[in-house]
Image: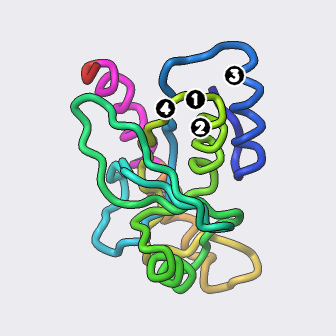
Amino acid sequence: MVTGAGPERAGDGLEAALKESRPNHIVAIGLCGGLNPADPIGAYAIPEELVAGYDDAVYACAPWPGVKAHGRLLSVGKLAATPQEKSRLRALHHARWVDMETFAWASVAERHGIPLTAIRVIVDGAWDYIPTWRVRKSWASVLTLVAHAWVAHRRLRAIGPRILCAR
């Protein structure tokens, strides 16, 4: 199921999906940004804890058999687009990764009494700019981000069989 980017679309999309079917566990798979400069592009982010950057609420992720969770993923309302912003978020929230959807999914899952495990793949590192026309310094990042997206896509495709084998 694809819910869309951002917390509002993610939450609304999952709510709509849960009206159609009720799983016994939700695995939130997708992309994230790295906040730890030591984490490489394409690394799996399997947090044990989620934090909402907009109100500091915390959610403990459900364990998944055979998968070791560690670290904290921060969900924010807008892209963390510069290395400076990523560094600030890491220091403020003690998070290793950042995205915009996972906490919204976790909130919906919790309201419905369904455990959630998050598995994300790092597509942009702590040192990367997210390209925007407003920041000239970020323009060169377009090609880098395309290459990173290719790596992340390959890693995302590998998740399915690994999850099925872990059960």
Q: What number is the disc on residue 110?
A: 2
Magenta-span inclusion, residue 154: yes
* Closer to us: 157 or 36: 36
Q: Position of residue 106 (x, y in %)?
A: 58, 42
Marks 1/2: CA–CA distance: 5 Å
Numbered badge on residue 18: 3
**Are the residues tagged 1 and 3 within 8 Å (C-beta)?**
no
Q: Nearer the viewer, mark 3 or mark 2?
A: 2
Q: Residue furthest top?
A: 21
Q: In this figure, which residue is indicated by the disc labeled 1?
A: 113
| Residue at 59%, 67% in the rendered image | 56
Q: Amino acid at mark 4?
A: Pro
Looking at the rendering, which quadrant does residue 139 occupy? bottom right
Residue found 36% across the figure and 52% down from its top: 42
Residue at screen point 77% across, 26% down: 16
Query: What's under tag 2, amino acid-wise?
Result: Glu
> What's the mark number on residue 11?
none
Mark 4 residue element: loop
